[in-house]
Amino acid sequence: MATHDAEGQPAIRQYGAVDFRDGAVRSAAFTGTSTITYAGHLAGATYAIQGNILLGPEILTNMEKAFVEASGALADKLMAALQGANVPSADRRCGVLPSISAFVRVARPDDPNPSGFLDLNVDLGDFSQNPIDLLQERFEEWKLQPVVAFEAKPTAGTDPLVMVLDASDSRAVAGATITAYSWYFGDGEVAAGVATSHTYLLPGTYRLLLEVMDSNGRVGKGERTVEVSFREENPAPWVCTDIGTPSAIGSGRFEDGRLTAVGGGPGFRNTSDHGHFSFQEVEGDFAITANVYALNGYSGGSSAGVTLRATTDGGAPFAAVFIEQLASRISVQWASRQTQGARAILESGSSISPPNAWIRITRSGDLIAGETSPDGEAWSRIGEVSMAVPNMVLAGVAISTPSRFANARGAARLCAITIEQSDPGENAFHRADPNLSATTDLSDAVTIFGHLFLGEPSALACLESADTNNDGAIDISDGIALLNWLFTGGPEPAAPGPSSRPCGVDPDEVGSQGDLGCGEYPACL
């Protein structure tokens, strides 16, 4: 037992500790020099009792006797010890009452809740009632609640985290039976039943809660903390970077037409932006569209949207449509900054909610507009702005968090992301569409095989567009790869392919290895 409050200073307060080490229970207690009479302590094999400003030493001995003689679990013995101090003026400041507050708290080694499985507190702040008697009533009621015990596996991992849950070890007491199991996953989703499973789509820290009700209407509760981390993977064809100085590092991952991203920082507003940006370079007029499928609004909140940006500088001109979720509150905003370093202007838009939230930014010359849709079909304009930005700009997804907690990160999943250029000019390129039909289907594979085996070179207006796997040659593997993607779930043709970037700039420069050349590339139809 340490006898110093700080290095070189004598201990002036009271201390008590009991632990279990190497198979043995140890206890110790100490009463410092600045406690007020009566002050003292008692320590036994499994307990340590301290008190000051007491009526007398009998308060401590009463508590010790009650603790030692009480039967039952530790919680019962602690409650009995408090009753040992339930005499008038046990605390000399409290008149006829023993005290003005009382609490009992018990935790098990595997309790995820820092307050433990038992945490009862009566703090009256006045002298209206006896707090120990009130605590005893609550304790007796607590003992009648169902005992909640459940397995949740795993409680930590990378997104998406699939968790299996089983509460069959929970039980009712006092002759009752369990009638309902209610699961609250901490991400807005709920479930019922003794066993279930749940998928956490996005990274974050979640509070998993189970409520069990018995046939007498009593409810017991148990909880776990679930930690879901971001699964790092190559974000190509997107470039991922942080804007400004967010408090937490962001990242992005692109797979199967979905972009999953995390980002810290207070967002894209005021005169300087702080958040994460996943983008592609786009030239000329275009539209970027995305379905905001999921936001993690329950771990500090998330804000995500599509945006056009002049540069990655924190004060650069930009325009964006954001969807922000904080707990169950969802808002939609149109944001824009017309000139370098100016204050961003925010306007509210119509309400849409993930997974039925579609957003779009379009550029036509200097006119930039934002739109929202509940289904990707019927669009409503949320705002527009005229700004002079370079012909080549950055288009992509911005994410941040409304949380002001240090190291907090928002998380979002966006699906069906497309960047469509309305007039891309001579550098337009569309892989896996060699017949220039503006769609990729069986006829494109037929065109490739016709070129290879039937001597139909004129069918290929652009050789590079037929190089499905981008290996620098037109052969049977390109047709097979295209059929595999169309009909058996195989990999998508190399970027810019049918969904990742339906129309864009050929990634291979003319004359470089792997480039077959097209002369004047066909326009994106």
Image: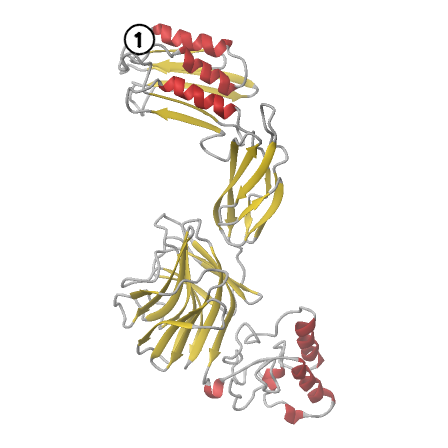
Whether residue 163 is visible here, answered yes or no, is no
> Residue drawn 55% across and 81% down?
430
Residue 457, image x and y in percent? 66, 92
> Residue drawn 37% across and 51% down?
403
Residue type, numbered disc 1 = Leu
Q: Is residue 211 left or right of residue 359?
A: right
Q: Name the image quarter holding residue 97.
A: top left
Q: Residue furthest right?
A: 453
> Residue drawn 40% across and 7% down?
61
Q: Is residue 150 left or right of residue 456?
A: left
Which quarter of the rendering shows the N terminus? top left
Tally the marks. 1
Of 288 and 159, nearer the camera is: 288
- Decide: is 207 above or below 312: above
Of 169 and 340, nearer the camera is: 169
Whether residue 127 is visible here, answered yes or no, is yes
Q: Is residue 510 left or right of residue 442?
A: left
- Decide: is 465 above or below 44: below
How many other residues sit within 10 Å of disc 1, few (<14), some (14-19) or many (≥20)? many
Q: Name the image quarter holding residue 360.
A: bottom left
Residue 176, image x and y in percent? 60, 27
Q: Which residue is mark 1?
A: 55
Residue 257, image x and y in percent? 55, 67
Of 371 and 44, nearer the camera is: 371
Helix, strand or loop for disc 1: loop
Q: Name the image quarter holding residue 124.
A: top left
Residue 306, image x and y in percent? 42, 68
